[in-house]
Amino acid sequence: MRQLLVDTMLFSMTPKQINESRKEDGKIIVSGVLQRAEAKNQNGRIYPKKILMREVKKYQENQIKENRALGELDHPDSSVINLRNVSHNVLDCDWDGNDVVGRVEILPTPSGNILKQLLHAGIRLGISSRGLGSVKEVNENTVEVQDDFELIGWDFVSNPSTQGAFMYKDGLGENIIREGVDMKTITKIDPKIKRINENITNIICEIGNICECIFEGRK
């Protein structure tokens, strides 16, 4: 059965890098790793490279070529891109070994402005793929994405599931499964992660007047 599959890479930029990434027309373009093949993430999922190569090629020929490679701020509960929550557009992507790398333009939308302020504040975020597909169990703690996988796009999220990849300034019904780490399943939350998510919540409340928090007990 096909599910909504999500796989996240860490994203980190300083306010200085954000300012340096601005072009003459005022656009903010960041670049780095979008996704990684052949590596198990914290949710125990592996994406075979041959499957990702096929989907990245389709994404290049359709969404990117037609200037509609849009992404959202936070993963929705749907496989459809919600235009009201669009924050960025993927300008291009390619391969570097097992990594999918690309350039992303932050758009002047309400969600894009929130994203820009989060990055200016030095908040560490994740950039996360969203797609539909099924998985097959490899062993007790690992599953592999199957050939029916279909890439939808990349979103920015607060809880990464894959460690060790960062983005830098410009220079380069269905069941729901989320690759972003589910805070409710973690018995002991890292204080650093908790502070990051609290900072994100505060910024969103101030800029977007949206005060929904991922931590239980805060409204």
Image (cartoon, rainbow, N blue to C red):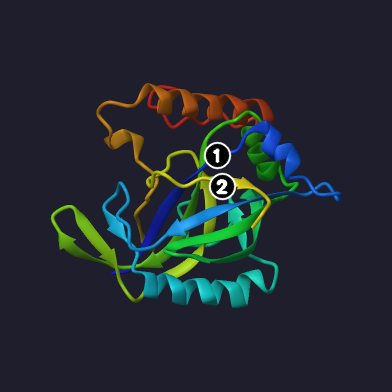
Q: Quadrant of residue 136?
A: bottom left
What residue is shown at x 23% (from left), y 60% (from top)?
143
Is 171 positioned to the left or the right of 5 in the image?
Answer: right
Spatial distance from mark 1 to mark 2, Cα to Cα? 6 Å
Is 215 positioned to the left or the right of 63 in the image?
Answer: left
Q: How many marks?
A: 2
What residue is shown at x 42% (from left), y 44% (from top)?
164
Residue 155: horizontal and vertical position, in percent?
A: 54, 52
Residue 12, numbered label: 1
Question: Which element carries disc 1, helix, strand or loop?
Answer: loop
What residue is shown at x 52% (from left), y 39% (from top)?
125
Q: Quadrant of residue 210?
A: top right
Q: Residue furthest left?
A: 140
Is 31 positioned to the left or the right of 58 in the image?
Answer: right
Given contact means CB atoms under 8 Å apart, are the residues at marks 1 and 2 in contact? yes
Q: Against 193, is 136 above or below?
A: below
Badge 2: residue crowd in 10 Å (few <14, some 14–19, many ≥20): many
Q: Which quadrant holds the N terminus?
A: bottom left
**Residue 219 in view in this figure:** no
Residue 108: horizontal and vertical position, in percent?
A: 75, 46
Residue 114: horizontal and vertical position, in percent?
A: 66, 37
Q: Mark 1: which amino acid?
A: Ser
Q: Residue furthest right?
A: 24
Residue 148, numbered label: none
Q: Mark 2: which amino acid?
A: Met
**Residue 27 in view in this figure:** yes
Residue 167, numbered label: 2
Q: Against 196, is 38 above or below?
A: below
Residue 7: horizontal and vertical position, in percent?
A: 41, 54
Question: Which element carries disc 2, helix, strand or loop?
Answer: strand
